[in-house]
């Protein structure tokens, strides 16, 4: 088990804010086998998954995507494109605007989508390769996406149901 420090998310609002200065220690088991993938739920999104834009990446270092975009299907919406990426296990580069207005570029491995209960917005749950951690993104705030032309294996599973918090 490896303890890492993550930063900058407002659990109460579940919004992206690269300018806040809160941190939290989280643990992740990097030795989990494929049969024992961690299971994440909606509860985890607000409790322990920092959201996009909360750690400032060095955007100047972003290299152009080399994959030929014409070899990939075209979609009418980011939601349809992300569902295809989830189904096909395809890495994606997101051009994304945080709620604070901060623009970020992220290379992600999309795993699941769900509808936020408080805002009714579609949310994408993904592995962020830039931050090396789980992240969630409001699909409405995806400005552009590019196919990386790289397959990925799932790092976790997602269940769209609340966790039973009752004591037993």
Image (tube, helix red, strand yellow):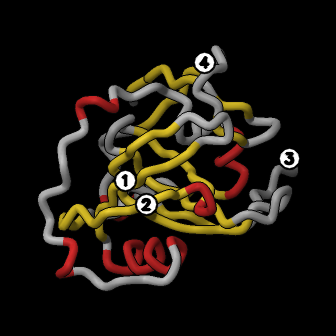
Does the residue at mark 2 contact the one at mark 1 (Cβ under 8 Å)? no
Q: Is residue 35 above or below residue 130?
A: below
Between the residue at mark 2 and the residue at mark 1, the CA separation in whole angstroms equals 13 Å
Rendered image quadrant of residue 57: top left
**Residue plotted at (23% across, 61% down):** 148
Q: Mark 1 or mark 4: which comes first in sequence?
A: 4
Q: Is residue 79 above or below residue 95?
A: below
Give how far across and how far down residue 129 sits, in percent.
32, 44
Does the residue at mark 3 contact the one at mark 4 (Cβ under 8 Å)? no
User: Label 4 belongs to which residue?
Assistant: 23
At mark 1, the secondary structure is: strand
Q: Mark 3 or mark 4: which comes first in sequence?
A: 4
**Residue plotted at (12% across, 58% down):** 66
User: Label 1 belongs to which residue?
Assistant: 108
**Residue plotted at (50% across, 71% down):** 78
At mark 4, the secondary structure is: strand
At mark 2, the secondary structure is: strand
User: Label 2 belongs to which residue?
Assistant: 144
Between the residue at mark 1 and the residue at mark 4, the CA separation in whole angstroms equals 22 Å
């Amino acid at each position: 088990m490896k303890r890492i420090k993550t930063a900058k998310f407002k659990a109460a609002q579940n919004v992206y804010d690269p300018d806040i200065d809160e941190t939290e220690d989280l643990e992740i088991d990097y030795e989990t086998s494929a049969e024992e993938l961690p299971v994440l739920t909606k509860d985890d999104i607000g409790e322990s998954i920092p959201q996009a834009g909360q750690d400032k990446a060095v955007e100047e270092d972003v290299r152009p995507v080399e994959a030929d975009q014409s070899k990939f299907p075209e979609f009418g919406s980011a939601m349809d494109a992300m569902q295809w990426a989830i189904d096909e296990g395809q890495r994606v580069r997101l051009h994304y605007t945080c709620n604070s207005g901060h623009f970020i570029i992220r290379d992600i491995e999309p795993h699941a989508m769900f509808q936020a209960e408080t805002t009714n917005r579609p949310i994408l749950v993904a592995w962020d390769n830039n931050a090396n951690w789980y992240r969630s993104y409001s699909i409405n705030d995806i400005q552009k996406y590019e196919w990386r032309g790289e397959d990925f294996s799932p790092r976790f599973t997602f269940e769209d149901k609340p966790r039973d918090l009752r004591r037993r």
